[in-house]
């Protein structure tokens, strides 16, 4: 997003009566002490390590980067993050660090076939990335990578390895950006048309963070595609979130939120945020805007994980009843649905 456009959004939001000043329902949300826990890095120092796990059944290496609180900790809730097309295990490092500081183990696998190796050194990198997106085998491989990572985490926990002693296998969330968000939702039960099989939900997963989810554009009804999802999902997008390579336009990104009815759903739409705002790639022309959004992505996602992976029911209720709108503030608007009830701020 261009800085001038970003500043224009801020000027608009500062006007009296705007969404930034209150809400479309006439409700006013003041800054709460509860928010401070999530808007600042947590108290834990963060350690990182890299590894390559090999799925022997597929003869496929899966590079990873892990973020976790340094020192002795009780078993931690786990978040598995899947990068977008052309990314790597270094993707969304800002989220990995932030989540770990708040007491989560964040595992970032890299997916061969749709990672940075697809475009590096190519004369037409965008065409190479689009070709990767158009190949349905890459979605199959990503989903298999994620299932392999979940299986490996379960094995580490059962064997009580040094890593396994950090893992609470009963509290696992999955996250992703763009193509990674699609793979994450498939793990939760989405069955998109390019997938050559019907996806059964992985019951180990207790929640999903879907950043810039791609959509099966042109389908008259998406209900069947998402019907099997039965876990809470935090969806995030932006008003400028058009896909750089696929057919999904910014307005389409809300389709998963509108189509999932089996559990709590929250949709955050950031004013002026584009597709790469979420991934942590601070491009020169967007360096003024991206940190503004990313601080709110950190806070909102951490509150969501705390509510649903640490089983803090009052926090989950607060988020759906206006708390998420407090966290997002003037950066965007929030819609939430719980047990059939619909709210919008």
Image (cartoon, rainbow, N blue to C red):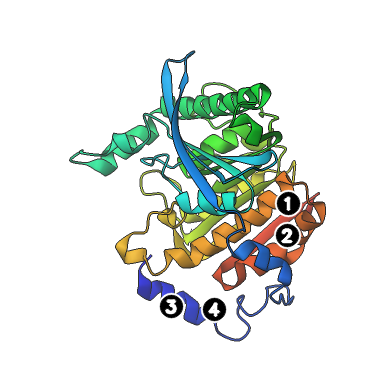
Residue annotated with mark 2:
319
Give the residue at the far bottom of this rendering. Answer: 16
- Which residue is at 74% across, 54% downward? 337
Residue 190 visible in rendering: no
Callout 3 secondary element:
helix
Q: Is residue 158 above or below residue 262?
A: above
Callout 1 secondary element:
helix
Q: Quadrant of residue 175?
A: top right
Q: Nearer the viewer, mark 2 or mark 3?
A: 2
Residue annotated with mark 3:
8
The quarter in which the C terminus is drawn is bottom right
**First along the sequence among labels 2 and 1:** 1
Percent position of residue 60, x then y: 42, 20
CB atoms of marks 3 and 1 within 8 Å? no
Q: Is residue 148 above or below residue 207?
A: above
Q: Residues within 10 Å of mark 4 (few under 14, many from 20)?
A: some
Q: Quadrant of residue 126?
A: top left
Distance from Cα at disc 2 to Cα at disc 3: 28 Å
- Which residue is at 68% across, 67% downward? 35
Percent position of residue 203, x then y: 70, 30
Give the residue at the far top of this rendering. Answer: 57
Callout 2 secondary element:
helix
């Amino acid at each position: 997003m261009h800085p001038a456009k970003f500043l224009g959004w801020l000027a608009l939001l500062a006007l009296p009566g705007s969404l930034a000043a209150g809400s479309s329902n006439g409700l006013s949300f003041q800054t709460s002490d509860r928010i401070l826990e999530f808007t600042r890095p947590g108290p834990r120092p963060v350690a990182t390590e890299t590894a390559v796990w090999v799925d022997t059944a597929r003869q496929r290496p899966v590079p990873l980067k892990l973020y976790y609180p340094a020192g002795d900790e009780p078993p931690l809730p786990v978040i598995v993050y899947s990068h977008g097309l052309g990314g790597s295990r270094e993707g969304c490092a800002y989220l990995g660090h932030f989540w770990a500081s708040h007491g989560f183990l964040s595992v970032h696998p890299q997916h061969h076939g749709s990672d940075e190796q697809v475009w590096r050194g190519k004369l037409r990198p965008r065409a190479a990335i689009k070709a990767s997106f158009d190949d349905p085998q890459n979605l199959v491989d990503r989903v298999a990578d994620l299932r392999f990572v979940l299986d490996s985490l379960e094995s580490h926990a059962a064997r009580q390895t040094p890593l396994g002693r950090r893992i609470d296998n009963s509290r696992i969330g999955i996250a992703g950006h763009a193509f990674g968000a699609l793979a994450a939702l498939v793990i939760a039960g989405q069955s998109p048309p390019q997938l050559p099989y019907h996806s059964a939900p992985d019951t180990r997963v207790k929640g999903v963070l879907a950043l810039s989810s791609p959509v099966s554009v042109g389908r008259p009804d998406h209900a069947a595609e998402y019907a099997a999802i039965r876990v809470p999902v935090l969806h995030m997008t932006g008003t400028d979130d058009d896909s750089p390579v696929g057919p999904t336009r910014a307005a389409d990104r809300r389709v998963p939120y509108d189509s999932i009815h089996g559990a709590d759903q929250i949709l955050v739409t950031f004013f002026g945020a584009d597709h790469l705002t979420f991934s942590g790639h601070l491009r020169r022309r967007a360096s003024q805007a991206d940190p503004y959004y990313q601080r709110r992505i950190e806070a909102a996602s951490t509150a969501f994980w705390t509510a649903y992976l640490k089983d803090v029911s009052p926090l989950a209720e607060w988020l759906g009843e206006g708390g998420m709108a407090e966290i997002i503030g003037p950066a965007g608007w929030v819609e939430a649905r719980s047990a059939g009830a619909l709210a919008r701020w």
